[in-house]
Image: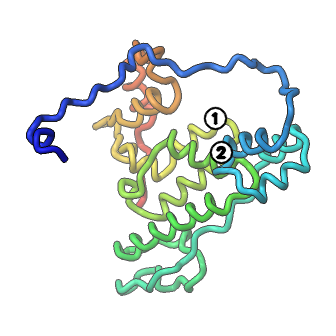
């Protein structure tokens, strides 16, 4: 480095002007695609519907027509995947139900009173979910589960228990490609979401508007065009909070 450069204050980098930035829209409409469906198109399709396009999947879909490929990618399993299993040491807490769970069997139906064990369960849950994404089936499900997790966002640290995080994930899977209205109802009453956005603290004597606001601002209605005046009012938020009082969590 030159000595003068070292002693000279660097200019602040100029940020690009994002005013008026808009995402380009497609203009193809709803007319069915009639172009080629070769390797490039297959890779493009798989990258949009799955986590990447490995050679085995590309080779598999080379034997399919476009219609067959799309139908297969949009057909998701009815049954849920096998749940995460106990891959950690037994609890040291006397009387903790986790001690009765054999190694290699699932813990998702049994509570624990040991915070250390629950922390290991969170790791088990995260490994399980990551494994499902890495070893994805040839369909859109895993990408949709992650998409909906980003939409109805929660965090394991705020949810507080691994069982509740797993149950939240199960709801995302169950509704990933179904009816959005039923999806919103399920996620609203989900223990993990009740914990994450304080729904379990919402009572008729002390209303908590956190979920009622997020429900409309982020999950359903939205903020409005260009984040302008939202199409819902503060009265709507208060009304939602009142409607949702009473849903709590049994420890």
Q: Quadrant of residue 39?
A: top right
Q: Nearer the viewer, residue 21 or 213?
A: 21
Q: Residues within 10 Å of mark 1 (few under 14, many from 20)?
A: few
Which of the labelled discs sits on residue 45, or is there none?
none
Q: Nearer the viewer, residue 20 or 211?
A: 20
143 left or right of 232 in image: right
| Cα distance between the residues tagged 1 and 2 | 8 Å
Nearer the observer, 146 or 106: 146
Q: Position of residue 184 (x, y in %)?
A: 57, 37
* Image point (40%, 83%), residue name: 91
User: Is residue 218 positioned above or below 129 on the image?
Assistant: above
Q: Residues within 10 Å of mark 2 (few under 14, many from 20)?
A: some
Asked whether the residues under the numbered discs 1 and 2 touch, taking CB atoms below 8 Å apart as contact, a structural biologist would say yes
Indicate the secondary structure of the residue bearing disc 1: helix
Give the residue pinned by disc 2.
175
The reply to whether residue 40 is visible in this rendering is: yes
Q: Secondary structure at mark 2?
A: helix
Residue identifier under label 1: 180
Where in the figure is residue 181, as x and y percent of width and height? 62, 33
Question: Percent x, y for residue 86?
Answer: 53, 78
């Amino acid at each position: 480095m030159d000595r003068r450069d070292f002693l000279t204050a660097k200019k602040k980098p100029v940020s690009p002007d994002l005013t008026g930035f808009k995402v380009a829209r497609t203009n193809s409409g709803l007319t069915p695609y009639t172009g080629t469906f070769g390797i490039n198109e297959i890779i493009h399709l798989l990258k949009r519907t799955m986590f990447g396009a490995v050679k085995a999947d590309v080779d598999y879909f080379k034997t399919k027509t476009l219609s067959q490929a799309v139908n297969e990618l949009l057909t998701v399993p009815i049954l849920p995947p096998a749940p995460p299993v106990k891959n950690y040491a037994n609890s040291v807490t006397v009387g903790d139900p986790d001690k009765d769970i054999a190694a290699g069997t699932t813990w998702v139906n049994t509570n624990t009173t040991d915070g250390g064990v629950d922390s290991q369960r969170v790791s088990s849950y995260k490994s399980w979910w990551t494994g499902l994404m890495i070893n994805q089936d040839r369909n859109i499900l895993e990408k949709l589960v992650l998409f909906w997790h980003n939409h109805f966002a929660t965090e394991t640290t705020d949810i507080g228990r691994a069982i509740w995080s797993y149950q939240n994930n199960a709801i995302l899977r169950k509704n990933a490609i179904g009816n959005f209205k039923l999806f919103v109802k399920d996620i609203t009453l989900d223990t993990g979401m009740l914990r994450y956005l304080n729904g379990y603290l919402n009572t008729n004597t002390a209303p908590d508007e956190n979920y009622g606001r997020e429900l409309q601002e982020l999950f359903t209605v939205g903020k409005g065009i260009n984040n302008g005046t939202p199409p819902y009012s503060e009265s709507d938020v208060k009304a939602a909070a009142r409607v949702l009082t009473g849903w709590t969590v049994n420890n």
